[in-house]
Image (tube, grey):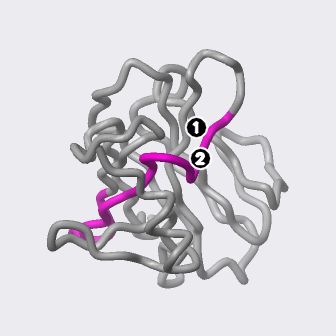
Amino acid sequence: MPSFEHLFQAARGQPVSYQGRTIVMLDHFPTLQSRRVRLVYESIGSKWRQGARLKLDGACKINDPIIQRRTGIVLWYDTAPTTVTVELVDLGITVVTVNNVWDVGDGVVHAWHNGAAMIVDEIPNGRRYRCNDGFPDDDFDDIVFRIERVAAE
């Protein structure tokens, strides 16, 4: 089974081609001046705990409290609502960095090693992320979620 870690190391973290598909370690989701983005979990297919990490340069709001964490926020599939709206408080936020994470039961937030990779598909008003966690396979179904720009109300 594939270890995408070696492919990404050789490419210095840049996207790589695998079986005719482009795979990435992380994605830079453009906000296109939207002040809110919505993360929607679609499915998981792993025995490990799965989540999505969102990193942005500035503050955001999720259910009222303002979060100022440049290290990013992790939203776990098993504890977050299926749909999470993130309000971008700082006007200068133009990109949200997105990657998948997992926990094998050791309480550590794992990312970017061994079999980890994502296929990113453009969808209307956003992107779908089909992710592989650290288990070396290539089914890209360990966690599937999408991020959408939310129109101003």
Instruction: Identify the image quadrant of residue 76.
Output: top right
- Farthest residue to the left: give it: 20
Q: Give the residue number, with chain letter if any, for mark 2.
A: 111
Q: Is residue 69 visible?
A: yes
* In magenta segment, residue 125: yes
| Residue 57 percent location from the top left of the image | 76, 71
Q: Residues within 10 Å of mark 1 (few under 14, many from 20)?
A: some
Labelled disc at residue 126: none
Q: Residues within 10 Å of mark 2 (few under 14, many from 20)?
A: many
- Of labels 1 and 2, the one closer to you: 2
Q: Which residues lie in the magenta part?
A: 109-128
Is 114 left or right of 106, judged from the image as shown? left
Q: Which type of secondary structure does the marked residue at label 2 adopt? A: loop
Labelled disc at residue 75: 1
Instruction: Identify the image quadrant of residue 58.
Output: bottom right
Q: Is residue 124 visible?
A: no
Under mark 2, the amino acid is Ala
